[in-house]
Image: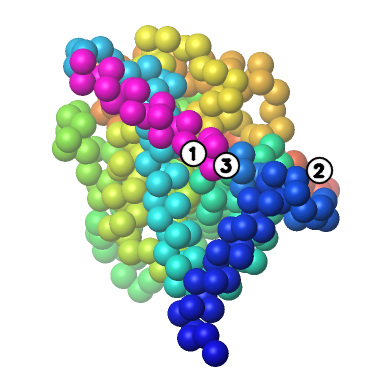
């Protein structure tokens, strides 16, 4: 009888042989299974091509350190780092339990965000962008709900007549958000939301602790930094890293606004712009508005603070455009109160 280790090794070899035969067309498989094998083959090829492209970008950067990277090159390097960590995670779980191979085959249609980018097809990408848009919508709802609950809680405290710093901060935050909701232009809303940050103009001294907690939590949820049981310090660190990445890529976009079609949706998602159902023309127009506001506010506000305010304004606009908000608008409309 074979040992358990020998059986596991033999099973893996048989699995690799079946994959090779299926990819070569030597074995006729059902259409869904054959589709998974084709996606696997395309993903592996894409990962190898991505590795070669990253090597070329790094080599050209070493030869000419003064040359700035374009937006496409920066996004390519960032995508490669994310894909590498996803591959390491999947490889760990596969070696931990080979039986997870079946789960790995079902993974593309269930949780597309867990797979490297080159293993995604058009349907899984659309699902991922739709999940991001729904998360931004939930973030707006949760922020408003949290502010309302905190305000109501402070109204019934016995010491409400005494001066309190937390109550003053909450009142200021609620008033600022209400004014931003009533703005008719993005630039005006960004200027109002920028009041929530009272700190230095230097990028390295930007401190998220000086911004109200409900606003920071909503921003973390908008960019997907609100994992299960994630400590607050890790959320703030992820948000700060995201804002710094936006600053680098925005500087490249301000020099050359020609965004490739395949990166347009991802660029808008990183900045919480629009919804997946918007046309390419509207997405490009919204991205141009975002860059124009950045150019106008340059030198007047903290570079990371203005990007955080733009994330909030873009999320609010996307939430108002989402079809899921029709019932909420009807709930608070005057026509239903007659």
Q: Could you tell me if the residues under marks 3 and 2 are in contact, i.e. CB atoms within 8 Å?
A: no
Q: Earlier in the sequence, mark 3 or mark 2?
A: 3
Separation of residues labelled 1 and 3 (CA atoms): 6 Å
Type of secondary structure dominating the magenta stretch: helix
Separation of residues labelled 1 and 2 (CA atoms): 55 Å
Q: Which residue is mark 1?
A: 47
Q: Quadrant of residue 295?
A: top left
Which mark's residue is nearer the viewer, 3 or 2?
3
Q: Which residues are magenta?
A: 44-63
In the rendering, which numbered label is found on residue 335?
2
Separation of residues labelled 3 and 2 (CA atoms): 52 Å
Q: Could you tell me if the residues under marks 1 and 3 are in contact, i.e. CB atoms within 8 Å?
A: yes
Q: Dot 2: what SS?
A: helix
Determine if the magenta segment contains residue 47. yes
Q: Dot 1: what SS?
A: helix
Q: Quadrant of residue 275?
A: top right
């Amino acid at each position: 009888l074979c040992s358990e280790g020998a059986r596991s090794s033999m099973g893996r070899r048989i699995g690799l042989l079946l994959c090779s035969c299926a990819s070569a067309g030597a074995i006729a498989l059902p259409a869904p299974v054959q589709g998974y094998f084709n996606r696997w083959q395309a993903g592996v090829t894409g990962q190898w091509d991505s590795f070669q492209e990253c090597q070329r970008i790094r080599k050209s950067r070493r030869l000419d350190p003064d040359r700035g990277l374009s937006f496409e090159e920066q996004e390519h390097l960032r995508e490669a780092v994310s894909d590498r960590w996803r591959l390491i995670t999947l490889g760990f779980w596969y070696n931990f339990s080979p039986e997870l191979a079946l789960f790995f085959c079902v993974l593309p249609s269930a949780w597309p965000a867990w797979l490297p980018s080159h293993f995604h097809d058009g349907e899984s990408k659309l699902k991922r962008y739709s999940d991001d848009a729904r998360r931004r919508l939930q973030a707006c709802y949760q922020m408003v709900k949290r502010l309302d609950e905190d305000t109501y809680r402070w109204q019934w405290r016995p010491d409400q007549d005494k001066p309190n710093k937390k109550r003053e901060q909450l009142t200021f935050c609620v008033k600022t958000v209400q004014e931003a909701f009533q703005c008719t232009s993005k630039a005006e809303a960004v200027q109002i939301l920028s009041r929530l940050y009272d700190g230095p103009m230097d990028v390295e001294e930007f401190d998220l602790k000086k911004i109200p907690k409900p606003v920071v939590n909503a921003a973390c949820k908008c960019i997907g930094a609100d994992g299960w049981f994630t400590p607050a310090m890790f959320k703030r660190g992820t948000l700060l890293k995201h804002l710094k990445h936006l600053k680098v890529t925005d500087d490249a976009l301000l020099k050359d606004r020609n965004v490739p079609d395949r990166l347009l949706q991802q660029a808008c998602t990183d900045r919480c712009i629009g919804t997946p159902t918007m046309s390419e023309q509207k997405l490009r127009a919204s991205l141009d508005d975002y860059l124009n506001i950045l150019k106008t506010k340059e030198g007047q506000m903290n570079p990371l603070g203005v990007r955080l305010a733009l994330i909030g304004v873009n999320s609010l606009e996307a939430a108002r455009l989402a079809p899921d908000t029709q019932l909420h608008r009807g709930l608070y409309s005057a026509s239903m109160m007659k």
